[in-house]
Structures are given as structure tokens and as C-alpha cells.
Image: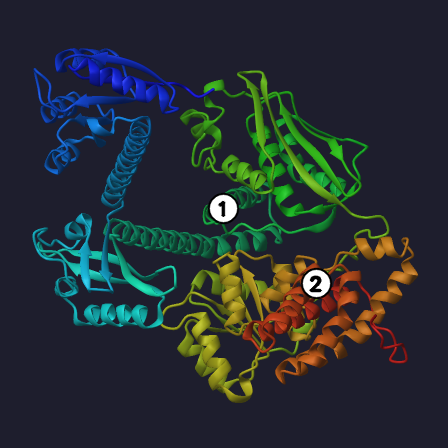
């Protein structure tokens, strides 16, 4: 059932009142009708009751209709009003409508049909007005929001109406371009604020492009403010089309991005300063390392020479003290360099096969003399459930354990230190191992536990004075653990002891692929030096004297040049078999001298050169090898290691001569993963050996064909050859090569003649060469005879 309309009739004539009520009742309109006989009474009723419609007599004793409408408007009442008058005058009708009436009806038309039509017209008009006001309000709110958003985002807008070329600027546009808001908007006015001719040309070019191509464009330019400062502006121009896709407007937006630009410039400056700071710090650490290691080389070297002579007990005690002090100093230097690498995010980890028990035994063996000297028990226990052969970074594990166990020994005066290794979780391929170091030492106060891991910090200043150290050991230890995905925890109680514990994840070495035991090296004889001529290029007199003494032990005399100029003269006059080259020297450093030898000394350009440097960093090693040196040895060096380096380079041992550092790094990463092949072969070593040998026999030919087709852009052959070698690479688990093949195949599909495809093929070739070398030199496989099948699939 429809709701009844609430209608109020204001009329002082009862006859008219009855007529209107009767016509309403006969019109079919359902209504509750009330009446008032004066304007005053009508106003009172309207204030108390909300009506849907009002019939108002134009002429009332206390007011006329126009005044009444004004009164309603002042009261904020928007109820539709129908004027009723006996004067059928168009002027009155016009005044009524202009005054706010919804309709006008002469008394002569107060019939049911006339009333019905008038009511419907009035209600319809009223609803339309309400909707219009609602829409206008929404538009106003949105316009205000847009204006506020433009102000906050510093975005202005402008428009060109293509029908009449009328131009519009938003309020924020005037603000950003610093134009008086009273100025008439025009494109000429916009261009007048672009100071640089290039910016004016850029704007005109882009505007014409958008008009011509019915498209959009984005660009940037600068704006010189009236106070002389610069604003950076992003501008966007777009063509707006009508329903027939015909251009009707050009819309432009401008955004002041000066703050973002200034922040960006500040960030760039901060980045440059940070990078410069890192460079300065690295340079300082490198120089510090060099300056300390150079004399340390002499101190440790001469201590070793003294040690090999006949010493009485006092002299031996003094030599041992020198060695101990030197070793402690080297630990401090290495700690600082490790900290620097971690801080610069340059610390790397390798995955190699190792024996956990051998690793632990090595750590205990290394630290046992300290425990014996302090009469402290040094114990260890390995959970028998743990598989012994694992894959991980054994060097970093040793470093962590030496730091923790060494620390425990340092701060324990009586009782014991114990290393406990337990397995917390395992899968078929991985194991999670907890390492705990327990001691009965001095303990750590609860409020100091967090601070012991801070750089250059210890539990107390007294600790540093009494026990020594840099305060970096635990910082480095924690970082090494965290970089491998672990967390270190500490439990401690003053005077009772401490427990340091951490959990690390390791891969298991799969059955049938056990680490190859390295044959124990026999002590190398120096006899091979007998007929060789050796030049040492070294500016430090202490190191010169040490070298002379070392080679005298080997019954060998050497020539010495104390700078690059003298070295060049000696090389020109003599035929040297090998050169030992210090890196950091005045006038001409070792790298510059090596470059000179390689490019200017003709038949002598290929003399083997071994770098001797106190810069004990991978970057320095890489730089030396890239600059043409054959090998690298950091100071202070072990005499036997120097002898091996000389032997390897003089005897042309293939595994070390002129080996690029990247090759060394890649081989150390172990490109080959035998897990899939081992599973595929059910652990059959004969089958595995045959498959690997087949790969070693056929891969070089396939790779050569791949390189040639790549150079000639022969996509058909390249695609076939890459596909041919793909399954063999997958079988051997050469993940990097498989990833490279995936990139090549993708590039062949999307951009077959592109540069990325060419570069990736060269990368694949290098990876496969490294893998072949790894199979032959590390895993000990050999190629099949040439009679074998050449099929790779």
C-alpha cells in the first residue's frame, strides 16, 4: 500500500478549501490533508510538521504568496508549493515560479484532473531540484577535494577547449607558476614563464605532438622563481575525446617536484659521501694492513730463521715469545679486515664437502696448547646421529668455533671448556646442528650480554686491560653466524660461567659422493732452484734481508732491485727465470712495473711474476692477477708456501700457472652437484664415471660449435647445439649452466639477434669450461677415448 502524502492547504476561503480537498480525494491520490486559514497559522504548522506538499492561496489577509515563499526560504524549508489564485494572470504565475513555487493553478482549474496533474508536476519538479542540489553539492565537494589534493601534491592543471580555443588554469597552476590569478589564462602566458628557450621549444613540440597524434606525453623542465630559485616541474599533456573519439580538449597537468628533486639530490650526495667514506676506510685498512704486515713479515721470518738455529733455553723462550706476540698481532689485523668485509657486505661463503669430525678435531688440536698451559680441561662431544660428511663453509665454521672456544679459554681460570655438537633436526638432504660452548669462567653480567656483540666492545674496561683483544671477535662471530641464517644466544652467570650456542644448517653429502681424500704432500725439496735466476723487487730493507736469509737456507743467491727503475735495468741485462714482485713501492708500484714488463720487454715479457704483498685482501689478489701477474702470496708468508709457489710457476704446473682469479673462485664454489646423477645411477660408480667421461669427451666439440654459431648468428644451429648439451648439463647438476641455457633459449624466442643472447652464450661457454676443469682436476675424472660415441643425449 502506497504511503499517503501529507498535504497542507493554506486558504482563508472555506469554499476553495473544500473544493481542493474534494478534488484531491477524487484525483486518485492518497493523501492526509490538513488546513490553515492564515499565513501565520500555516507557518506554525509547517514548523512543527514536515509536509510533502503545500497548496497556498496567493492572496491571504496577513500576507501575499510571494512574501510567504520568502519566509519559507528563510526558514530553510524546501517543501514544494502550488500557488492557488483566482487571478489567471501570467505575471502572477511568473512571479510565483520565480519566487520558488513548484506550480501555479487558477481556481477555475481546481478539478480532480487539474489538481492531480499539478500535484504530480510539483512533486516531480521538487524531486528534480533536490537531485540537482545533491549533484551540485557532490560536485562542489569533489572540486574542493581536487583543489586540496592539488595543493597538497603541488599539482596544477590547465585546459584548452579545441572548439573555441578558450584556456583554463586551475588555482594551483597560478600558484606554482607564480602568475597573478587576475591574469587571463592563455598558452602564451604559460610559455612566458618558461625562461629557457629550450624549455619553450620542448613545450611547443610536445603540445603540437599531442594535438596532431591525439595522444599523450610526459616531460620535465625547470622554472625560475621570482626570488631566483629553481623549481623542477613534471608536465603531462593529454588529448580528451568525445563519444565519437574526436578531440575536444587538451588537458595538461603540472607538478612541482622540487622537494622530491632536492631530497633525491641530497640522497645522491649522501650516497656519494657514504661510498667515499667506505673507500677511505678500505684504503686506510689496506694501508694499515700493509704497514703492519711489512715489518711483521720480517719479524716472523727472522724468528723462524732463528728457530732453526742452535738456541739455548733462554733464546728459545725469547723466540717463542716473539712468535706468540706476532701471531696475536696478526689475529688482530685479520679481525679488523674481516670486520671491514662484513661491514662493506663483501663477506662470501662457499659450499664445500668436509668432515665435521676432522674440522672439530682441528679446532681442538689448535687450541689445546692454551688449555694445557692454563691447566684447564678442553672437552668436546659430537652427537653420533650426525652424518660426518657435510657441505658448507668449513673455514668460516672453524673461525667461529676458534673465536668462541678461544674466548672461553681466555676468560676461564679453572675448571673446563666444552664444545658440544648436537643434531636438532634432519631431512634426507639437510641437517640442523647446534654448537654449544660451555665454560666455568668469569661469566658475564646480564646487563652486559647484549653489549659484548657490539664492535670494539667488551664486558668491561677491566676485561680489556686484563685479557686483551680488540672487542671484534664476538662481533665478527655473530655476523658470520647471522649471514649463514643462524642466531647466537648466550646464557651466563657471574663467577659461574657462560654458554654460547648457535644453530646452523648444512647440506648432507649424498651417499656415493664422498669427499676425495687429498694425498699427503711430501716436503718439497729446494733442489729445483739450483740453476734458476731469481729477481726480488722489494723496497723494504728488512724484507730484502729476510729474503736473502731464506734463499740462503735453500743454498740459493738472488738478485735484488729496490725500485721499479732498477728492476727494469736488471731485467734488460739478465735472463731471469722468475720475479718476486712487491706491490707497494715508491715511483713505480708492482702493478705498473708488471704492466711495463708485459708490454715493453719483448721476449722477456712472459717471465713468471709472483706478487708479494702485505695487502691481504681478495681485491688485491684479483687486481694483481688481472694486471698480469702469475701468482700471489700475502705477507707474512710461510717459507714452504713460497717454495711451492716458486716450484709451481717454474715447473709450469698447469693447475696454478696464470690461473684467472675468477676461475679459482668458481672452482671453489663447486659447480658440479652429483646428487641427481647419483640417484639416476643408483649409486653405481662405474656408470657415473662413464657418463662423466662421455661428457668430458663430447662437451668441448659441442661448446666450440655453440661459440661458432653464436658468432655467425646461425640461430638454427645454435638452438640445436644448446638443446643437445642441455640434458648432459642437467644430469651433472651444473645449475649455473642450466640457468644460462634457460636465458639463451628465452632470448632466441624473443630477441634472437640481440646482444644479450650473444653475451649469455659466452657466459655458458666459460661456465662449462670451469665445470670441465673441476671434473678433471678436483674430482679426478678423465675423458673417454676418441672411439666413444659422440652423442650427448
Q: Is residue 428 visible?
A: yes
Question: In the displayed structure, would residue 539 be above or below residue 78?
Answer: below
Compare residues 322 and 204 and report the one nearer the observer. 204
Q: Quadrant of residue 678?
A: bottom right
Q: Which label sits in the foreground, 1 or 2? A: 2
Question: Label 1: which residue?
Answer: 342
Question: In the image, what residue occupies the spot 17% across and 34% down?
Answer: 97
Q: Quadrant of residue 279?
A: bottom left
Question: In the image, what residue occupies the spot 20% across and 51% down?
Answer: 170
Compared across the picture, whether 671 is left or right of 331 comes to right
x and y percentages locating residue 633 in the rendered image: 56, 62
x and y percentages locating residue 257 in the rendered image: 26, 52
Question: In the displayed structure, would residue 17 be above or below residue 314?
Answer: above
Mark 1 and mark 2 lie on one chain; the one further toward the N terminus is 1
Q: Quadrant of residue 433?
A: top right
Compared across the picture, whether 427 is left or right of 115 comes to right
The local crowd at label 2, few if under 14, some if 14 to 19, many if 20 or more residues have their Cα within 10 Å, is some
Q: Is residue 760 visible?
A: no
x and y percentages locating residue 258 in the rendered image: 23, 52
Amino acid at each position: 500500500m502506497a504511503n499517503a502524502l501529507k498535504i497542507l492547504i493554506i486558504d482563508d476561503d472555506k469554499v476553495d478549501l473544500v473544493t481542493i480537498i474534494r478534488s484531491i480525494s477524487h484525483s486518485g491520490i492518497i493523501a492526509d490533508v490538513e488546513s490553515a486559514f492564515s499565513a501565520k497559522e500555516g507557518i506554525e504548522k509547517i514548523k512543527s510538521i514536515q509536509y510533502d506538499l503545500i497548496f497556498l492561496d496567493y492572496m491571504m489577509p496577513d500576507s501575499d504568496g510571494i512574501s510567504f515563499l520568502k519566509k519559507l526560504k528563510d526558514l530553510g524549508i524546501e517543501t514544494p508549493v502550488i500557488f492557488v489564485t483566482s487571478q489567471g494572470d501570467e505575471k502572477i504565475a511568473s512571479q510565483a515560479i520565480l519566487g520558488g513555487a513548484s506550480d501555479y493553478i487558477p481556481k477555475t482549474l481546481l478539478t480532480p484532473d487539474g489538481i492531480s496533474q499539478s500535484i504530480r508536476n510539483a512533486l516531480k519538479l521538487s524531486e528534480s531540484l533536490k537531485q540537482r542540489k545533491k549533484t551540485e553539492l557532490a560536485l562542489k565537494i569533489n572540486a574542493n577535494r581536487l583543489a586540496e589534493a592539488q595543493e597538497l601534491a603541488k599539482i596544477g592543471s590547465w585546459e584548452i577547449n579545441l572548439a573555441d580555443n578558450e584556456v583554463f588554469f586551475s588555482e594551483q597552476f597560478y600558484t606554482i607558476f607564480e602568475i597573478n590569478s587576475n591574469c587571463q589564462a592563455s598558452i602564451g602566458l604559460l610559455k612566458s614563464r618558461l625562461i629557457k628557450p629550450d624549455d619553450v621549444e620542448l613545450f611547443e613540440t610536445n603540445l603540437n605532438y599531442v594535438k596532431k597524434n591525439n595522444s599523450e606525453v610526459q616531460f620535465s623542465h625547470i622554472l625560475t622563481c621570482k626570488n631566483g630559485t629553481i623549481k623542477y616541474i613534471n608536465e603531462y599533456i593529454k588529448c580528451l575525446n568525445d563519444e565519437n573519439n574526436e578531440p575536444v580538449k587538451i588537458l595538461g597537468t603540472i607538478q612541482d617536484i622540487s622537494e622530491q628533486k632536492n631530497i633525491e639530490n641530497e640522497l645522491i650526495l649522501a650516497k656519494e659521501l657514504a661510498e667515499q667514506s667506505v673507500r677511505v676506510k678500505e684504503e686506510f685498512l689496506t694501508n694499515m694492513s700493509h704497514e703492519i704486515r711489512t715489518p711483521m713479515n720480517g719479524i716472523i721470518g727472522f724468528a723462524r730463521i732463528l728457530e732453526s738455529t742452535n738456541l739455548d733455553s733462554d733464546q728459545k723462550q725469547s723466540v717463542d715469545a716473539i712468535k706468540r706476540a706476532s701471531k696475536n698481532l696478526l689475529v688482530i689485523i685479520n679481525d679488523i679486515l674481516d670486520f671491514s668485509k662484513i661491514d662493506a657486505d663483501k663477506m662470501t661463503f662457499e659450499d664445500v664437502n668436509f668432515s665435521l669430525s676432522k674440522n672439530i678435531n682441528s679446532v681442538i688440536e689448535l687450541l689445546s696448547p692454551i688449555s694445557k698451559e692454563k691447566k684447564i680441561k678442553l672437552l668436546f662431544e659430537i652427537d653420533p646421529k650426525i652424518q660426518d660428511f657435510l657441505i658448507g663453509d668449513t673455514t668460516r665454521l672453524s673461525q667461529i668455533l676458534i673465536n668462541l672456544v678461544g674466548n672461553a679459554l681466555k676468560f676461564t681460570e679453572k675448571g673446563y671448556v666444552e664444545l658440544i655438537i648436537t643434531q636438532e633436526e634432519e631431512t634426507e638432504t639437510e641437517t640442523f646442528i647446534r654448537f654449544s660452548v660451555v665454560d666455568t669462567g668469569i661469566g658475564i653480567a646480564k646487563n652486559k650480554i647484549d653489549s659484548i656483540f657490539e664492535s670494539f666492545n667488551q664486558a668491561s674496561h677491566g676485561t680489556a686491560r686484563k685479557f686483551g683483544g680488540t672487542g671484534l671477535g664476538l662481533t665478527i662471530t655473530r655476523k658470520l653466524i647471522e649471514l649463514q641464517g643462524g642466531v647466537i644466544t648466550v646464557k651466563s652467570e657471574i663467577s659461574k660461567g657462560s654458554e654460547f650456542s648457535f644453530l646452523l644448517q648444512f647440506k648432507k653429502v649424498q651417499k656415493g659422493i664422498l669427499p676425495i681424500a687429498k694425498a699427503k704432500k711430501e716436503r718439497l725439496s729446494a733442489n729445483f732452484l739450483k740453476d734458476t735466476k731469481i729477481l726480488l723487487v722489494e723496497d723494504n730493507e728488512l724484507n730484502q734481508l729476510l729474503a736473502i736469509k731464506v734463499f740462503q737456507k735453500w743454498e740459493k743467491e738472488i738478485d735484488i732491485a729496490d725500485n721499479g727503475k732498477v728492476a727494469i735495468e736488471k731485467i734488460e741485462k739478465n735472463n731471469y727465470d722468475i720475479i718476486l714482485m712487491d706491490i707497494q713501492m715508491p715511483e713505480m708500484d708492482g702493478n705498473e712495473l708488471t704492466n711495463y714488463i708485459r708490454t715493453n720487454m719483448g721476449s722477456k715479457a712472459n717471465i713468471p711474476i709472483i706478487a708479494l704483498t702485505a695487502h691481504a685482501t681478495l681485491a688485491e689478489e684479483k687486481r694483481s692477477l688481472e694486471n698480469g701477474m702469475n701468482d700471489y702470496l700475502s705477507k707474512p708468508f710461510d717459507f714452504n708456501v713460497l717454495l711451492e709457489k716458486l716450484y709451481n710457476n717454474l715447473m709450469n704446473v698447469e693447475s696454478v700457472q696464470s690461473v684467472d682469479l675468477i676461475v679459482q673462485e668458481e672452482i671453489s664454489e663447486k659447480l658440479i652437484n652429483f646428487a641427481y646423477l647419483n640417484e639416476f645411477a643408483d649409486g653405481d660408480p662405474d656408470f657415473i664415471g662413464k657418463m662423466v667421461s662421455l661428457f668430458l669427451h663430447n662437451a668441448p666439440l659441442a661448446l666450440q660449435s655453440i661459440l661458432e654459431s653464436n658468432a655467425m648468428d646461425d640461430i638454427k644451429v645454435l638452438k640445436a647445439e644448446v638443446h643437445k648439451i642441455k640434458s648432459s648439463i642437467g644430469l651433472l647438476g651444473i645449475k649455473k649452466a642450466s640457468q644460462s641455457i634457460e636465458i639463451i633459449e628465452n632470448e632466441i624466442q624473443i630477441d634472437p639477434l640481440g646482444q644479450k643472447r650473444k653475451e649469455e652464450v659466452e657466459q655458458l661457454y666459460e661456465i662449462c669450461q670451469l665445470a670441465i676443469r673441476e671434473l678433471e682436476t678436483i674430482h679426478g675424472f678423465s675423458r673417454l677415448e676418441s672411439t666413444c660415441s659422440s652423442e650427448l643425449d
